[in-house]
Amino acid sequence: MKYNRKVITGSVKLKYVNVNEPRVNGLYLEPKYSLTILIPKESSTMDKIHEAIYNATKNGLDIWGGKVPDNLITCLKDGDATGRKEYEDSFYINATSKYKPQI
């Protein structure tokens, strides 16, 4: 059984948004799209994100032999640990893709 891992966020801030297709000397390079999503810690979206991370780990149990690794690293980071003022009181996610986002 596959558990739902998709989340539709409420109000968030986007930082370091890169949605341009890179070109160097007229040569086409593989595009890379990226951004940082800042989510307030008090946001109701956080419950949805924690649930999606939990579901993603449940989906991966077959890969890990039925047990979630103790040293599992997730995409969700604590902004207070960065020491950056704009990240305070928020969680953040760095997202990248080679596919153009559909917004």
Image: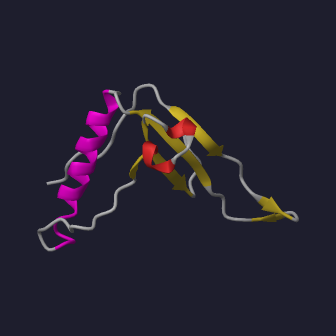
Answer whether residue 81 is magenta in the image.
no
Instruction: Determine the image quadrant of residue 61.
Output: bottom left
Q: Is residue 24 left or right of residue 82?
A: right
Instruction: Determine the image quadrant of residue 89.
Output: top left
Q: Position of residue 45 (x, y in %)?
A: 33, 31
Color theme of the render? secondary structure
Tally the numbered discs: 0
Q: Position of residue 62 (x, y in %)?
A: 16, 69
Answer whether residue 56 is magenta in the image.
yes
Q: Main secondary structure of the magenta part?
A: helix
Query: Residue 99 or 54: which is nearer the viewer?
Result: 54
Q: Residue at x 21, y 68 (%)?
A: 69
Q: Is residue 21 left or right of residue 64?
A: right
Q: Residue at x 27, y 68 (%)?
A: 71
Can see residue 10? yes
Q: Residue at x 31, y 41 (%)?
A: 49
Q: Residue at x 59, y 40 (%)?
A: 15
Q: Is residue 63 left or right of residue 84?
A: left
Question: Outermost residue toward the left?
Answer: 66
Query: Residue 78 or 21: which is nearer the viewer?
Result: 78
Question: Outermost residue toward the front?
Answer: 83
Q: Position of residue 30 (x, y in %)?
A: 67, 64
Instruction: Determine the image quadrant of residue 85.
Output: top right
Which range is magenta? Answer: 44-64
Can see residue 103? no
**Viewport quadrant of the C terminus:** top right
Vertical placement of residue 72 versus 81, above or below: below
**Viewport quadrant of the N terminus:** bottom left
